[in-house]
Image: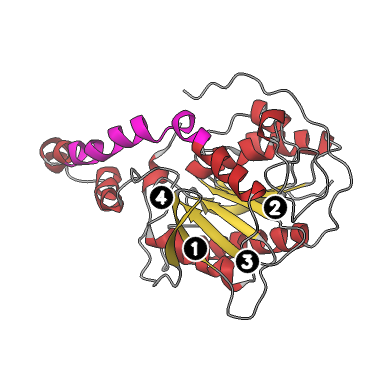
């Protein structure tokens, strides 16, 4: 379930430097390292509710690209992402106001917010968008790579809404596995869609169900004051991952960080800005390490997919 913090924050004043292209039939914001630098791999940025055209998401994509990655940010919401215009009224609704303002003004503001929220929840649910996400990653894995490489590394970075999709990819179910493009492998054995996953303040995560099924190396960045994932759930998640022998992981709990800190942070809030910078560094470090590893010579075990119901620092690496 989403929380109010999913729709709060600040709009970046940065200027994106990438471009929009159609990649595998999906409008995608594309940004990469400077000319002459061969990418370490592809990071597919799966956004928060505000989607691929939200300036904050694009600016963060650019930051990853500067560190040596080709970054794709697809429109997995098919043009129906949440409008940033609700951010200001959401703040107003949650602010303490006089009783007159609360009774006579806030209801009208709430109607304006619901005008955007209700269609978004109806059209952009995880259940309705999951097939498109899987199809996109399947096309990436089975198509010629966009740059010269004999071992294309693909990572998924999920933020808020995108976190659930990223966890699904990291669960590596048999029906999601594909045979890599012939330029990348001489084997016909089906392989996972991604090589590594990274999540920041994800939503819709179920503990322990979603965590039990994880098979792909995964890194989590979660705020200590995140309304979506409580500290107890984070500790349970860490314990489950540590008990696994087939899923490298790290779990970083950032003190004082609130939901949305990695994307929609107020630049005047030093605590949240520090958390955002820490999350960015964590992602870059994680993908850099995973993308430079020697390719696996055997397939990791997989689990059967269950039916889905879509209604201070803790770190370790196993």
Residue 44: image tag: none
Return the residue nearer the eye: 259 or 196.
Answer: 196
Dominant secondary structure (helix, strand or loop) of the stretch shown in magenta: helix
Is residue 221 at all visible to an observer of this figure? no
Estimate the x, y position of residue 318 in percent, counting from the top left.
Answer: 84, 46
Which residue is denoted by mark 4 in the rendering? Answer: 51
Could you give the CA–CA distance between mark 3 and mark 1, rounded to whole angstroms? Answer: 11 Å
Which residue is denoted by mark 1 in the rendering? Answer: 30
Measuring 66% from the left and 48% from the top, which residue is drawn there? 141
Which residue is denoted by mark 2 in the rendering? Answer: 313
Mark 4, other Cα within 10 Å: few <14 / some 14–19 / many ≥20 = many
Mark 3 or 2, nearer chain start? 3
Mark 3, other Cα within 10 Å: few <14 / some 14–19 / many ≥20 = many
Mark 4 or 1, nearer chain start? 1
Mark 3 or 4, nearer chain start? 4
Nearest to viewer (mark 4 / mark 1): 1
Could you give the CA–CA distance between mark 3 and mark 2, rounded to whole angstroms? Answer: 27 Å
Measuring 83% from the left and 35% from the top, which residue is drawn there? 244
In the picture, measured across the screen, residue 174 lies left or right of residue 19, that is: right
Which residue is denoted by mark 3 in the rendering? Answer: 69
Estimate the x, y position of residue 133 in percent, counting from the top left.
Answer: 53, 40
Specify the quadrant of the image occupied by residue 16: bottom left
Could you give the CA–CA distance between mark 4 and mark 2, rounded to whole angstroms? Answer: 29 Å
Q: Are marks 4 and 2 in contact (CB under 8 Å)?
A: no
Give the SS element for disc 4: loop
Q: How many callouts does the rendering have?
A: 4
Mark 2, other Cα within 10 Å: few <14 / some 14–19 / many ≥20 = few
Mark 4 or 2, nearer chain start? 4
Measuring 79% from the left and 51% from the top, which residue is drawn there? 185
Mark 3 or 1, nearer chain start? 1
Estimate the x, y position of residue 187 in percent, counting from the top left.
Answer: 83, 45
In the picture, measured across the screen, residue 136 lies left or right of residue 109, that is: right
């Amino acid at each position: 379930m989403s929380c109010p913090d999913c729709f709060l924050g600040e709009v970046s004043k940065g200027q994106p430097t990438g471009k929009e292209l159609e990649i595998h039939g999906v409008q995608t914001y594309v940004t990469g390292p400077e000319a002459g630098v061969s990418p370490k791999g592809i990071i597919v940025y799966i956004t928060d509710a505000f989607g691929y055209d939200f300036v904050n998401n694009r600016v963060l994509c650019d930051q990853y690209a500067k560190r040596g990655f080709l970054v794709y940010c697809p429109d997995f919401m098919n043009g129906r992402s949440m409008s940033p215009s609700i951010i200001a009224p959401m703040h107003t609704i949650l602010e303490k106001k006089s009783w007159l303002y609360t009774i006579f003004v806030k209801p009208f503001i709430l109607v304006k917010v619901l005008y955007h929220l209700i269609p978004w929840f109806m059209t952009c649910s995880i259940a309705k968008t999951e097939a498109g996400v899987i199809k996109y990653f399947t096309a990436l894995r089975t198509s010629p790579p966009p740059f010269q490489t004999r071992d294309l590394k693909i990572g998924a970075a999920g933020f808020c809404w995108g976190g659930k999709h990223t966890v699904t990819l990291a669960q590596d179910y048999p029906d999601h596995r594909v045979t890599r493009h012939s330029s990348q492998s001489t084997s016909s054995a089906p392989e996972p869609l991604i090589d590594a996953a990274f999540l920041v303040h994800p939503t819709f995560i179920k503990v322990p169900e979603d965590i039990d099924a994880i098979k792909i190396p995964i890194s989590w960045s979660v705020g200590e004051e995140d309304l979506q994932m409580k500290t107890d759930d984070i500790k349970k998640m860490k314990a489950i991952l540590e008990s696994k022998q087939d899923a490298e992981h790290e779990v970083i709990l950032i003190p004082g960080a609130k939901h949305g800190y990695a994307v929609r942070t107020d630049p005047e809030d030093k605590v949240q800005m520090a958390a955002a910078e820490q999350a960015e560094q964590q992602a870059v470090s994680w993908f850099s390490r995973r993308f430079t590893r020697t390719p696996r010579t055997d397939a990791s075990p997989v689990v059967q997919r269950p039916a889905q119901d879509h209604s201070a620092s803790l770190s370790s690496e196993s």
